[in-house]
Image (spheres, rainbow, N blue to C red):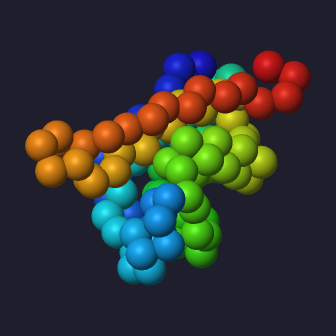
Amino acid sequence: MIDRIHIEQLDLQARVGVPASERAEAQRLNLNVTLWPKITKPQDEISDTVSYSEVAGSLKQFVGQGDYKLIETLAEKIAAHLLAEFNLRKVEIEVRKFVLPNAAYVSVTAVREGEGT
């Protein structure tokens, strides 16, 4: 059984922020994504697992097409999207935003489980 798959510091562009001026241009976000696949017995075939390449591509498209005020909302929507699109038991999403001048970043984390888990 695969316990988890982790994507560390995936850089994406998104329109996010409370003031409209902050959402006017896409800005850099950084995601840490942990996936717990429903796969019980991998057989060394990509079809037997969750493709982290497909997950990354899906996230780039999903995040890029939205307009969000809060990174909390974005993290929640990302978690729901991944659970709906991929064969997952559980996801953990950390969204990092680089907005405060005296801090490396601000982040939120959402941990969600799929139905029947």
Residue 36 seen = no
Q: Residue at x 77, y 48 (%)?
A: 84
- Which of the pair 101/64 is nearer the observer? 101
Q: Residue at x 37, y 38 (%)?
A: 107
Q: Residue furthest left?
A: 102
Quadrant of the snapshot with the C terminus: top right
Residue 29 in percent (x, y) is at: 36, 57
Quadrant of the snapshot with the N terminus: top right
- Which of the pair 106/89 is nearer the observer? 106
Residue 25 in percent (x, y) is at: 39, 79
Q: Quadrant of residue 67?
A: bottom right
Q: Residue at x 71, y 44 (%)?
A: 80
Residue 102 in the figure: left or right of residue 44? left
Residue 21 in the figure: left or right of residue 113? left
Image height check: is 76 above or below 53?
A: above
Image height check: is 117 above or below 38?
A: above
